[in-house]
Image: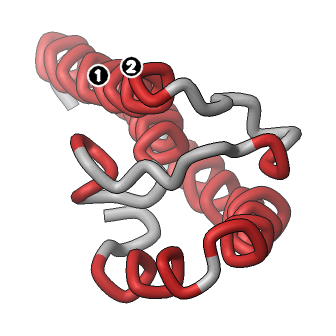
């Protein structure tokens, strides 16, 4: 790949990823609920508006896109393995436990949200 293309494309994807992370965190802060992924049980509000209308996990999606942008910058196909590994890891070890807790806290309201909005995109 052309170096200039790599820099431009990786910058665009990197900024997109950062934008998703910021939008997700701001949505949490606006309603006064936790952003801490290690303590989902402290969640006080199920956020469904803003960026969460399009993705249930915009912060994790943003992180995955930043990893993708780094891979584009490096111009190495193997770097896609890191993106795939990140998504698999996050699904299994972070998102599924969070979703179990959200179901426990918000019940049918969370179940409806899961049916309406995809996990990633």
Identify whether 4 is placed above or below 76.
above
Q: Which residue lies at the image location 75% right of the left edge and 30% below the top edge?
A: 36
Residue 60 in which image quadrant: top right
Residue 75 in which image quadrant: top left
> Which corner quadrant holds the N terminus?
top left
Identify whether 46 is placed above or below 62.
below
- Residue 75 visible in the shown view: no
In the image, residue 62 lies at what x, y percent? Answer: 42, 36
As drawn, is 88 to the left or to the right of 70? right
Taking depth in this image into account, of 106 and 12 the one nearest to the observer is: 106
The label number, if any, that marks residue 67 in the structure image: none
Taking depth in this image into account, of 64 and 21 the one nearest to the observer is: 21
Q: Which residue lies at the image location 84% right of the left edge and 51% below the top edge?
A: 41
- CA gap between label 2 and label 1 equals 5 Å
In the image, residue 43 lies at what x, y percent? Answer: 70, 44
Q: Which colour scheme appears in the figure?
A: secondary structure
In the image, residue 18 lies at what x, y percent? Answer: 37, 19
Q: Secondary structure at mark 2?
A: helix
Q: Which residue lies at the image location 45% right of the left edge and 30% below the top edge?
A: 31
Taking depth in this image into account, of 5 and 85 the one nearest to the observer is: 85
Are there few (<14), some (14-19), or many (20+) residues within 10 Å of tag 1?
some
Q: Which residue lies at the image location 43% right of the left edge and 49% below the top edge?
A: 47
As drawn, is 35 to the left or to the right of 56? right
| Residue hosting label 2 | 22
In the image, residue 48 lies at what x, y percent? Answer: 35, 55
Tally the numbered discs.
Answer: 2
> Which corner quadrant holds the C terminus?
bottom left
Are there few (<14), some (14-19), or many (20+) residues within 10 Å of tag 2?
some
For the residues bearing labels 2 and 1, Cβ distance under 8 angstroms: yes
| Residue hosting label 1 | 19
Q: Secondary structure at mark 1?
A: helix
As drawn, is 21 to the left or to the right of 91? left
């Amino acid at each position: 790949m052309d170096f200039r293309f790599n820099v431009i494309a990786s910058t665009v994807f990197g900024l997109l990823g950062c934008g998703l992370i910021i939008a997700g965190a701001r949505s949490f802060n606006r309603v006064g609920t936790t952003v801490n992924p290690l303590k989902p049980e402290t969640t006080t509000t199920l956020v469904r508006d803003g960026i969460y209308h399009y993705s249930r996990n915009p912060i994790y999606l943003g992180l995955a896109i930043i990893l993708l942008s780094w891979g584009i910058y490096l111009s190495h196909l193997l770097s896609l393995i890191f993106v795939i590994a990140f998504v698999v890891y996050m699904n299994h070890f972070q998102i599924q436990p969070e979703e179990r807790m959200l179901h426990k806290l918000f019940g049918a309201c969370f179940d409806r949200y899961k049916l309406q909005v995809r996990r990633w995109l």
